Image (tube, rainbow, N blue to C red):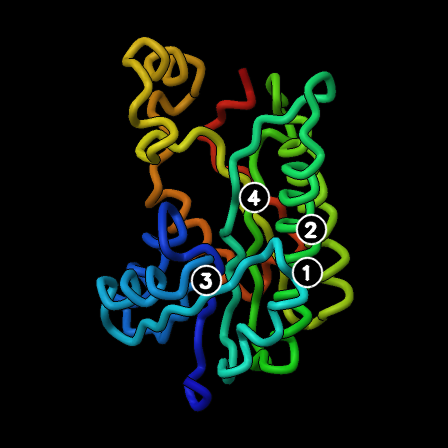
Amino acid sequence: MSNQESIIIVGGTSGIGRQLAQTLADHGESVVITGRDRDRAQLIAAEIGGKTTGIAVDLAQPKTIAQCFADVGKVKHVVLAAIERDENSAKEYDIDRAIRLVTLKLVGYTEVVHQLVPRFVPDASVVLFGGLAKERPYPGSTTVTTVNGGVTSMIRTLAVELAPIRVNAVHPGIVGDTPAWSEKSNEVLDAIKARTPTGRLVETQDVVDAVIFLLQNRSINGVNLIIDGGWLLR
């Protein structure tokens, strides 16, 4: 792996991260996916095929991240897609869960970038995942809303600190074909479609296409890209 110019997808073993890895691998890219479990990461990498490798990384344990990437060589792009769903309100506050999520996104994301910066190729780029809870909170989203708001600022400071390396973020809305939403009732999904100007739900491939655009376009920098079909407009 040390002689390859790789695209790192942190959180690439499931959901949007996995489909992104598959799309990139199908185009001949050397891809490194991460998950918390090494065996599962390696299994998913084998299923994706091509030049895909799986390694274990737990963003909530940031002091272990350096060793996790010890064998990674030159880095072409980094995508930080690892997320955790957390329902945590100020009235019923779980401190341990809150600390884990804050650490995962705000400290873990930054530590990954810190460790990989020396290996970036000159035109490397970084994409972080946030989410629209930052714009439209819901009951129990206290921590999620806070950390996704933090991502919007993090990309700006990283873009300045790492220049000329580009740093952007994607903020998906309701992604209809993900497990969290595909099992919802037709009534719920139809109501979402009705308030979305495009008249359709965002799909995983829409987000994948947006991430690839941000990785490749050399003039997009410090941008928080919302992917919601215009859902926030209504």
Going by the image, does 176 lie left or right of 78? left
Q: Which residue is mark 1?
A: 110
First in sequence: mark 4 or mark 1?
1
SS at badge 3: strand
181 vs 110: above or below? above
Q: Which residue is mark 2?
A: 106
67 vs 46: above or below? below
Q: Nearer the viewer, residue 116 or 228?
A: 116
Evaluate if marks 4 and 2 touch, with contact meaning CB atoms under 8 Å apart: no
Residue 49 location in percent, x, y? Answer: 23, 69
First in sequence: mark 3 or mark 4?
3
**The residue under label 3 is which amino acid type?**
Ile
Q: Quadrant of residue 51?
A: bottom left
Alpha carbon of mark 2 to alpha carbon of mark 3: how far?
Answer: 17 Å
Evaluate if marks 1 and 2 touch, with contact meaning CB atoms under 8 Å apart: yes
**The residue under label 4 is which amino acid type?**
Leu
Indicate which label's residue lies in the foreground, 4 or 1: 1
First in sequence: mark 2 or mark 3?
3
Alpha carbon of mark 3 to alpha carbon of mark 4: how far?
Answer: 18 Å
Q: Which residue is mark 3?
A: 9
